[in-house]
Image (cartoon, rainbow, N blue to C red):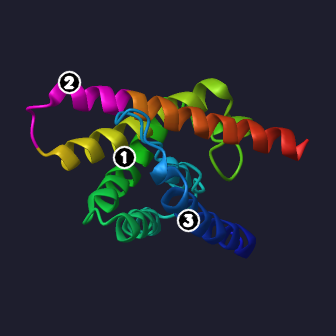
Amino acid sequence: MTSRTVFFNIVRFFFLILLQVLILNHVNLGGYVNPLFYVYFILLLPFSVSRGIMLISSFLLGLGVDIFTNTIGLNAASCVIMAFARPFVINSISSGPETLIGDTPSLKNQGIKWFLYYTIILVLIHHTFLFFLEIFRFIEFFKTLLRIGLSSAFTITLILISEYVFIFRQK
């Protein structure tokens, strides 16, 4: 990784935490839709980043959100699970090294199908773990599943819109 990539990821890290805690945490549609856009940082980490750096940065990302939202490690744990699953998801949906074009996963480099699978799987892993940890019981199982589904759909939509904005911006 170049120093430019490292700097850009550090800026993205702090920007996404601030965006999440200052704006997106105040969006709650009917108690079921909570956009958790900060996971975009984990999705966009370079392919070449080591597993240790990825896990530590994901923990710090979740911890940053936890500190501002007073959620006692829920986001940190969910981000670590997502980061831990990321290499397995990449390997399972990639047909080979030729699929991993470019330095970072993106809609532009990998195409819509690959990026959509990648995003859906990892966001669902994160949201499932987060919401079931938050409720910590199965009494409201179907309500929690609805929250996972709606929040995931909203988060994935925000991520895809961001990807399209960056594609058009680069042209």
State which tag comes first along the sequence, 1 or 3.
3
At label 2, the amino acid type is Phe
Taking the spot 56% from the left edge, 65% from the top edge, the residue there is 18
Secondary-structure class at tag 3: helix
At label 1, the amino acid type is Ala
Q: Are marks 3 and 2 in contact (CB under 8 Å)?
A: no
At label 3, the amino acid type is Leu
Q: Residues within 10 Å of mark 1 (few under 14, many from 20)?
A: some
Secondary-structure class at tag 2: helix
Q: Which mark is residue 85?
A: 1
Image quarter of residue 15: bottom right
The quadrant the N terminus occupies is bottom right
State which tag comes first along the sequence, 2 or 1.
1
Q: Bounds of the magenta span? A: 137-149
> CA separation, marks 3 and 2?
31 Å
State the residue in front, 88 or 33. Answer: 33
